[in-house]
Image (cartoon, helix red, strand yellow):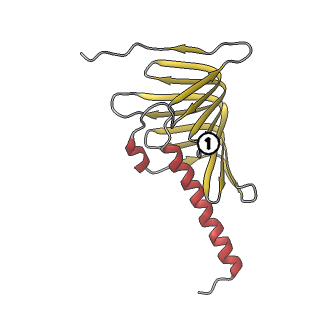
């Protein structure tokens, strides 16, 4: 079967779009917020559900709207809107917004779950950093961190939190549990 060059270009664009969505899902599952996510999550199927999905090739964006939910193994992201930005078939930024947007994932071993929420959750894939903006909140093993903005550098393992003008950064640290 002979395909015109226009048909070939359209087919290649559809393939690239699928690659961008797959890259987003792979990056999402492989980037825990605070700890060691279950390694088997990366091998699980990715489910994305939303009321609408649209792609803007010119702007290099995929946009999911309306009760968007991403599940892969124990990872779950829930938001009103999720925007995936990509360049050269690689995801460069994923932004989840909501009232609030939520992230949770089970950690390896007995480390429990990590939970995060904020009005906006931005994952920068190239620098491997996560920004929680607007009433940001992190919870892991009973320890909590709250602030207006929380930035987590996944590679360096650094967390920076900033207060809003009206409320301070708050942290509750739970003592380490001793094995019996």
Note whether 60 is above or below 123 in the view shown: below
Element class at badge 1: strand
Q: Position of residue 158 (x, y in %)?
A: 53, 29
Residue at position x 63%, y 20% from top?
Answer: 147
| Residue where numbered disc 1 is placed | 124
Instruction: Give the quadrant of the N terminus.
Output: bottom right
Residue in view at x 65 percent, y 67 percent: 13
Q: Quadrant of residue 16?
A: bottom right
Please state the horizontal and vertical placement of residue 86, each as a whole percent of the image: 65, 53
Q: Quadrant of the C terminus?
A: top left
- Displayed quadrant of residue 79: top right
Q: Nearer the viewer, residue 14 or 166?
A: 166
Against 143, residue 84 (above or below) is below
Viewer-side residue, 130 vs 56? 130
Residue 47 seen by the camera: no
Residue 109 in the figure: left or right of residue 48: left
């Amino acid at each position: 079967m002979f395909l015109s060059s226009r048909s070939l270009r359209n087919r290649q664009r559809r393939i690239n779009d699928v690659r961008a969505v797959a890259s987003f899902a792979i990056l999402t599952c492989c980037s825990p917020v605070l700890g060691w996510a279950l390694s088997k999550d990366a091998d699980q199927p990715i489910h994305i559900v939303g009321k609408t999905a649209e792609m803007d090739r010119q702007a290099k964006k995929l946009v999911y709207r309306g009760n968007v939910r991403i599940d892969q193994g124990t990872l779950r992201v829930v938001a009103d809107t999720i925007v995936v930005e990509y360049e050269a078939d690689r995801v460069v930024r994923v932004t989840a917004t909501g009232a609030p947007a939520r992230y949770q994932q089970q950690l390896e071993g007995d480390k429990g779950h990590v939970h995060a929420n904020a009005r906006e959750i931005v994952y920068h894939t190239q620098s491997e950093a996560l920004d929680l903006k607007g009433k940001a909140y992190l919870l892991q093993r009973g320890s909590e961190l709250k602030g207006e903005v929380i930035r987590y550098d996944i590679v360096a393992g650094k967390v920076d939190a900033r207060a809003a003008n009206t409320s301070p950064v708050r942290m509750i640290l739970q003592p380490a549990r001793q094995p019996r």
